[in-house]
């Protein structure tokens, strides 16, 4: 195996024996093969588009498969093999509809086998290192990881019935580009930036899907304590799953709590009406090894980030959608427009004790674009009067490494006339600090999940308009972003495509950036790493 797609890549270069995330070498290789087959599906699907054949099954397959290969989503070998086989079927059906095999068909579009052994063997030769030139490899992987992020957001939008044909078309174009051996660095770079543009598109689509389905997030005090009933804890990002579970547990005596990236579900009007929705339990994804234990009841992972569960609570872990783990019960997909069936979780919860309280109190969130715009006058006045001197975007992901305490310290040390704009699980490094408010505006404004970084961009663009500025970089906004997995990659590319410059990215720069590609990002976009809190503070607050 060789994988370097996330921030925790072993030794800062790549995992080669086993993933730091817990992914075994065979699963890592099979994920590479799944991507290979998905590229074949993209190739056939593009040909079908050219021939005017509508093929939504292929488009959904691409999104599902890319999402499955995201860090910490799916560790289930059998599920990945089944998805590879499904890819062959999707390819065959497109080939049949087209009638003849076009010329110059790439290997990923014709390779087939029924045997697991042959899959294992092939899987070792189609991974990241199959690209020999390190800059080409770097750009193709950067593009691939950006598209994995797009896939995740497209999947959530799809589940709510929202689609964007242009995003789907770009996914195919991007995937096909990764198997085109003729493309040079100067042809791949624009594709990476184009990927960012579709990142904005897909986040906008998901924003529309979420807000039209569940209302605009609003300022909310989220309870951190627990009730007396047994509960189900929901993690991941999928709001449709969350809604269906809320409905199915109503009146059962089972309470519902959010964990990690599901926290922002508390901010949506449509979910507030459920009395058995108690609040948020615990912190960001990596704290689950302790917090799932003390929760006592079943846990539903709707997406990543799943840490390989300990035996002590593994039988309480359920997965659905792109998430999967060998030995954990998987809740099947919706069929014929019917909701998912969560009855096994509900039955399980009945036999469990109520959660053990690990904290009490409340945190405030719900500052997505609509809510912030409702406060626009206040915000603009505070900027004009000098009460707010800087906005600091600290969005992104959290992770396990101890050096991430940098972000807690950074938030704590920020001058009192600065406001943090956040989204994603990165916020757990500072969202429980008592940073106070500026004239009623809290100093930490949480817009929501990582995809709600879109809200932060909307807010920035609106402020640019209000202040009559030419360039988004003239705003008193600095960016100190933490990354972990591939959704943060698309958030970063999306910001670059909006023209945002001088983003600080930490805690370390991606291992998949070759020195030359990193140099381009530094020269063209001023991307920088982080150093010490003191030094970065001096630079960013200047
Ligand atoms: Fe975090 Fe995980 Fe949302 Fe990621 S829970 S790390 S960027 O999946 O997607 O922020
Ligand atoms: Fe390693 Fe990250 Fe890849 Fe897991 S996802 S194998 S931790 S680089």
Image: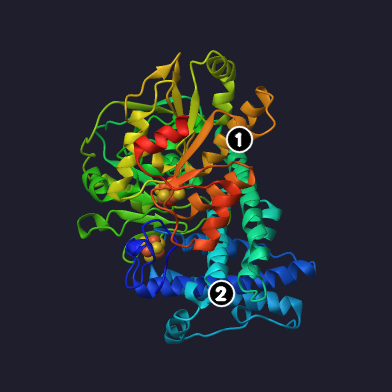
Q: Could you say which quadrant of the image residue 412 lies in?
A: top left
Q: Which residue is found at the position 54% from the left and 51% from the top?
A: 522
Q: Could you say which quadrant of the image residue 434 lies in?
A: top left
Q: Can the viewer see residue 127 in this picture?
A: no
Q: Where is residue 118 shown, x and y percent of the image?
A: 46, 86
Mark with earlier residue (1, 2): 2
Secondary element at tag 1 = helix
Residue denoted by label 2? 37
Secondary element at tag 2 = helix
Colouring scheme, one of rainbow, by chain, secondary structure, one colour: rainbow
Under 8 Å from ligand 1: the CB of mark 1?
A: no
User: Quick check: which quadrant has ligand 2?
Assistant: bottom left
Please indicate whether residue 206 sits to the left or right of residue 29 in the image: right
Question: Which numbered marker is on residue 473?
Answer: 1
Please indicate whether residue 228 sits to the left or right of residue 155 in the image: left
Q: Which residue is found at the position 34% from the left and 44% from the top?
A: 284
Q: Is residue 406 above or below residue 127?
A: above
Give the spatial CA distance, label 1 vs label 2.
41 Å
Q: Nearest the camera: 5 or 454?
A: 5
Q: Where is residue 418 shown, x and y percent of the image?
A: 45, 24
Q: Quadrant of the N terminus?
A: bottom left
Local crowd size for mark 1, using a 10 Å CA cut-off: few (<14), some (14–19), many (≥20): some
The answer to whether marks 1 and 2 mark residues whose Cβ atoms lie closer than 8 Å is no
Q: Nearest the camera: 52 or 475?
A: 475
Q: Which residue is found at the position 33% from the left and 63% from the top?
A: 11
Q: Can the viewer see residue 412 in this picture?
A: yes
Q: Where is residue 255 shown, x and y percent of the image?
A: 33, 37
């Amino acid at each position: 195996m060789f994988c370097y797609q996330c921030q925790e890549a072993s030794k800062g270069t790549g995992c080669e024996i086993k993933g730091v995330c817990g992914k075994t070498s065979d699963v890592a290789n099979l994920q590479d093969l799944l991507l290979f087959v998905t590229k074949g599906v993209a190739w056939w699907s593009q040909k079908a588009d050219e021939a005017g054949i509508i093929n939504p099954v292929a488009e959904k397959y691409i999104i599902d498969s890319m999402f499955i290969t995201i860090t910490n989503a799916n560790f289930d070998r059998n599920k990945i093999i089944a998805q590879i086989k499904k890819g062959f079927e999707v390819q065959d059906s497109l080939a049949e509809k087209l009638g003849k095999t076009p010329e110059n068909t790439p290997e990923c579009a014709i390779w087939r086998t029924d045997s697991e052994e042959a899959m294992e063997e092939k899987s070792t030769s189609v991974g990241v290192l199959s690209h020999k030139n390190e800059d080409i490899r770097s750009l193709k992987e950067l593009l691939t990881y950006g598209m994995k992020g797009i896939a995740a957001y497209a999947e959530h939008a799809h589940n709510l019935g929202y689609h964007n044909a242009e995003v789907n078309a770009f996914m195919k174009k991007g995937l096909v580009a990764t198997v085109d051996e003729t493309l040079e660095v100067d042809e791949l770079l624009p594709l990476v930036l184009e990927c960012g543009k579709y990142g904005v598109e897909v986040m906008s689509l998901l924003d529309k899907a979420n807000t039209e389905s569940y209302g605009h997030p609003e300022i909310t005090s989220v309870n951190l304590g627990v009730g007396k009933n047994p509960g189900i804890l929901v993690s991941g990002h999928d709001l449709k799953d969350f809604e269906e579970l809320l409905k199915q547990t109503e009146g059962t005596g089972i309470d519902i709590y959010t964990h990690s990236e599901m926290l922002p579900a508390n901010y949506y009007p449509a979910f507030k009406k459920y009395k058995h929705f108690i609040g948020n339990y615990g912190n960001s994804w990596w704290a689950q090894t302790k917090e799932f234990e003390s929760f006592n009841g079943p846990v539903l992972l709707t997406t990543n980030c799943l840490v390989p569960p300990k035996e002590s609570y593994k039988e309480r872990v359920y997965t659905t959608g792109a998430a999967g783990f060998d030995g954990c019960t998987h809740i099947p997909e919706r069929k014929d427009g019917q909701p998912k069936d969560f009855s096994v979780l509900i039955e399980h919860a009945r036999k469990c004790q109520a959660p053990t309280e690990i904290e009490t109190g409340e945190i405030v969130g719900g500052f997505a674009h609509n809510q912030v715009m409702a406060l626009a006058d206040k915000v603009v006045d505070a900027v004009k009067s000098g009460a707010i001197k800087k906005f600091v975007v600290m969005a992104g992901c959290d992770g396990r490494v101890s050096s991430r305490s940098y972000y807690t310290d950074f938030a704590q040390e920020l001058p009192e006339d600065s406001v943090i704009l956040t989204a994603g699980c990165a916020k757990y490094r500072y969202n429980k600090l008592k940073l106070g408010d500026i004239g009623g505006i809290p100093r930490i404004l949480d817009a929501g999940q990582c995809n709600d970084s879109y809200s932060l961009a909307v807010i920035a663009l609106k402020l640019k308009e209000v202040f009559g500025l030419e360039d988004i970089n003239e705003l008193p906004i600095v960016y100190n972003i933490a990354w972990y997995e591939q959704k943060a990659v698309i958030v970063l590319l999306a910001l670059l495509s909006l023209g945002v410059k001088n983003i600080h990215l930490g805690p370390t720069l991606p291992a998949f950036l070759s020195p030359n590609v990193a140099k381009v990002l530094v020269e063209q976009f001023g991307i920088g790493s982080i150093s010490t809190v003191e030094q970065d503070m001096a630079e960013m607050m200047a």
